[in-house]
Amino acid sequence: MISTKYGKMNVIPADKIVSHSLSLYGEWAGDELDFLHELIKPGMRVLDVGAFIGTHTLAFAQFVGETGQVYSFEPRKEIYELLRSNVCANDLAHVNIFNMGLAEVAGSITLESVDITESINFGGMSIDNYIAGEVNNVYEVNISTVDALDLSVVDFIKLDVEGMERRVLEGAVNVIARDLPLIFCECNSLSSGYEIFEFCQPLNYRVFSILSNAFNPNNFNGVSDNIFGDAKEISLLLVPVSKVQALELENSFESLIELKNLEDFVLPLLHKPQYAHEVLANTNSASKLSLYFPSPAVDRDRQHHKEAQKESEIALAEKHLEIVNFELQLTKLNQKISALIIDVEVKQQEVYSLHTDIQQLVTSTSWRITKPLRSLAVFVKKILKLSSAASIYWQRNPSVNGQVRLLRTIWTELRAGGLQALKTRFRMFRQAVDSPIELANTAAKQNADDIDELKRALQSLELSVETIIFDHNGGGGSNTYTSELINSTVSEHVSVLRVYCWGADWYVQLRNKSPSNNALYITADLDNLFSCLNCSSARNIIVNSLYGYKFIERAIDLIVSLKTKLSSTLDFKVHDFHSLCPSPHLSDYTQKYCGVPIDHDVCQRCLPRNLSWYHAWFDSSDMAVDIDIWRKPFQRLFDSCDVITCFDESSLNILQTDFTIDQSKVDVVPHELNYFKCIDKKFVANSLSIGVIGTLSHIKGGDVVKELCSYIDQEQLEVPVVVIGESSTQLPASAIIHGRYSPSELPSLVESLGVSVVFMASIVPETFSYTISEAIEMGMPIVAFDIGAQGRRVKEYRLGQVVPVGASPEEILNAAKSIHKAAKE
């Protein structure tokens, strides 16, 4: 809805004439309505025949005031609905609207429905020439006559019915003879205009023409851009002879031209610039005489297009210059990056050297002069203010060789670069200690042999391989599972090859119970890796995890080809949901569980923003841009599998949201809990205390626990929250954080800390949960979110209660109270 000169109006966005003018200028036919305002007085009864969306209707309603009446007629139901809404929007109780047409006789007509989203001139549609054919989308419209309306008096009639003016007038003969109304008609051609002229002669009416400009420079919105050029509209005013003198005295005829014969019509029509193109160009004479009448609108559009093209060319040149400047900046940045890469490589070599120093320091055993050197170390710490780094040295139980190497390092760094160099050296040492996985992988690269050595051993049959395991090397539960699996498989004569990707390189770890155990081989080329693996005679292939793999689609296809070549069995272990999404836990870019949307457009919007799961060695080609393309190679992998091992049946349900999986291949094998036994089940305390077991992060529910603690504090409730483990999420001071623990300590910790309900806070679906297993083994009440393995197992546990993902702290607390009460009973 827009504001116009005549009131609030709904318009047709696709209408390129009337609605466009109303939207741009806030008015339509401004010159014409200004003239009609002089003729239509308060209290008059006005007919608006061909009202369209109500521009003239709303204006007439203002002119006649509340003491007058306006009767508006619009036959097309789609347009009528807009007319009705515009009358209602302006509370015009004195306007009467009718969904009907008017003609010389009453009856009905069949109309085809119009699509108001099409870009056409809706105001120029006629119902006069419609012929019903094989069209389904049609409806009937009633046709009446003015005489049949039974109106007590009519003072003014406006006709805009696209050539049907004479037919409407024929049906108004009695009203015209009785009331002598002023009649205002649209005139688009000589033939339709002269028909009206002929109608007026026996009725003693005189005919006048008026030319109105389509564009009003003083328009309602004050827009100066003229989209109509010099276009004009011609209308006819039919005046009873008895009323001419009165109107002349009011100076209403100053701009009018009286039409007394056919010739008088010609010049006004020719004065309408678009008349030649719209009417004369379509005549038989124009065709025979080969006359061409250009369209003013087309000429104007062509000029606008030329100007727009020129502006576009200028803008394009400016953009090109910007691109050139960006390319220069990019070149400079690439040079800086290259320099930084070289610097990083130098720093890495220093780290490797420092690591060797650390290892020698740690493994030293002589203590003959440790006391004086430790005293010296205290002095060094005070001088250099590097207590954190130096204390790590002392905690490693250094001996003579280690202390001497430490002093040599301090002296060398001070001589080479002063105190700043020594600080840098110790900072590198702290980073190495704080990131053991990174350090281990960095050291592994230095010690790894070229993969060609392994290939030669396989080709010569010096080495017999039973199983190949594809894995990641980032630590965690799936790597622990791999270690247990390998230890239960290998022997002196049976070897396992464990394959993983780290830092864009491919590694093969040889595992057996011979002197060659833990030998490591490396290659930078994926095809070279599989060329080596193809030389084995492995009977089993296990895909434990492909997380961190570059060129993942290519890697999957090579795994499938390897299975075929070796005639091996292929077992896929479902440790996560990396097959469904690069985000292995199915957390979206807001770090919430996505629920695996059925609408893949949701995934398309998430993928370019959910980048936190990609490794540093990935480039743009490794990052998913289409979720369907990401999942296709995994579907091929599942199709090739002999076994798909799930550790909980909920994992299969999640995979089946978008994968087709043969049920006969699925083997649900929960993890064993051999490491954890609790003979005495825990007694549930009378008071409620919530325990969270394990390390807290955002994914593991850190923010949920934080909000729960804050809610308990805000409500001043006596409900302790205990974290048995560590937390990378900053929790309120009221939370009790115990820190690291061993599984064997867990039962006694639960009892001593007074935990009465275990809260499994993970906000993403787990494929298995050792925490749930441990809590069930201890007989503890449990609350968990209703997702994944944790949700399924807790629902089936007699002391378990689930809450929906995203549940409020109050809902979580109520669930804990409920299951705590049930456990006591």
Image (spheres, rainbow, N blue to C red):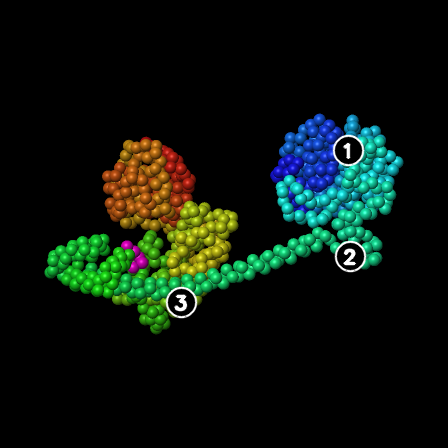
Q: Residue drawn 47% across and 63% down?
A: 327
Q: Disc 1 to disc 3, how far (Cα)?
A: 97 Å
The kind of residue tagged 1 is: Glu
| SS label for mark 2 | loop
Crowding at dot 3, Cα within 10 Å, few <14 / some 14-19 / many 20+, comes out as few
User: Which region of the structure is painted magenta?
Assistant: 434-439
Q: Is residue 187 left or right of residue 603?
A: right
Q: Quadrant of residue 147?
A: top right
The kind of residue tagged 3 is: Asp
Q: In the rendered image of this protein, does residue 449 appear above or below residue 25? A: below
| SS label for mark 3 | loop
| Residue 156, percent from left and from top | 77, 33
Circle nearer the N terminus (1, 3): 1
* Tag count: 3
| Residue 734, percent from left and from top | 29, 38
Residue at mark 3: 525
